[in-house]
Amino acid sequence: MIQYRALYTDELCRELFRHFNRHQVVKKCWRRDHGEWVIKDAPFIDDWSEADYQTLISCLKHTIQAGGVVCAAFADDLLKGFVSVEADFFGEERQYLDLTSIHVSEDMRGAGIGRTLFQMAKEWAKGKGAKKLYISAHSAVESQAFYQALGCVEAKEYRQQHVDAEPFDCQLECEL
């Protein structure tokens, strides 16, 4: 059985992620081509290095310290998924909150964990008064299918800092 709960800053350490497997084999991705979204071959393996984990832990701690939330999924007391939402509103009408990460361990994908974590993020953001979640999302076909199934669409306003940081990401929003 999967248990879900918010995380606290002092829980965020490398040991928490010891049994989390970010590994993802990507073959096809969505790309903007002459103003149109098309699927292109873009094979690569997405995985995190030790430095990536340290950066992630630092970012997640900052999210909580700044008033945001990090929720996690555990199977047999092992971290198998997490989602983070920042506390700062943005957009022309200040309607967005930023869903900055959502990841499920490779061994647990397809079990509904991502859907539940996304719902938790939506409920938290709505409770804070947001109208929409903003997601700078991985462009892999499988990742985009996940977001589309959850009702995400292309963002009406792009957040430039995300576009600059990850130019191949798809900029999405989800109404709350």
Image (spheres, rainbow, N blue to C red):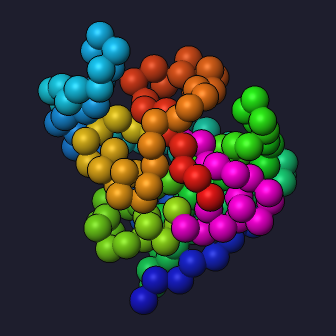
Tell me if residue 117 can be seen: yes
Q: How many badges with numbers are in the image?
A: 0
Task: Tell me the quarter of the picture where residue 27 sits.
Answer: top left
Residue 120 spot, x, y in % from top left: 60, 69
**Residue at the extreme top:** 34
For the point 52% across and 62% down, the residue is 118
For the point 31% across and 64% down, the residue is 109
Q: Nearer the viewer, residue 13 or 93?
A: 93
Task: Tell me the quarter of the picture where residue 39 sits.
Answer: top left
Q: Quadrant of the N terminus?
A: bottom left
Residue 53 spot, x, y in % from top left: 54, 45
User: As displayed, is residue 14 above or below residue 77?
Assistant: above
Queried whether the magenta region covers residue 133, the answer comes back as: yes
User: As displayed, is residue 100 above or below residue 68?
Assistant: above
Q: Quadrant of the C terminus?
A: bottom right
Q: Is 78 on the left-hand or right-hand side of 32?
A: right
**Residue at the extreme bottom:** 1
Q: Nearer the viewer, residue 17 or 31?
A: 31
Q: Is 97 on the left-hand or right-hand side of 155?
A: right
Residue 98 spot, x, y in % from top left: 66, 44
Queried whether the magenta region covers residue 63, the answer comes back as: no
Residue 13 spot, x, y in % from top left: 64, 57
For the point 48% across and 25% down, the residue is 166
Q: Is 135 on the left-hand or right-hand side of 24?
A: right
Tell me if residue 79 can be seen: no
For the point 37% across and 51% down, the residue is 148
Task: Tell me the quarter of the picture where residue 35 sits.
Answer: top left
User: As displayed, is residue 140 above or below residue 160?
Assistant: below
The boundaries of the magenta stretch are: 119-136
Q: Nearer the viewer, residue 9 or 104?
A: 104
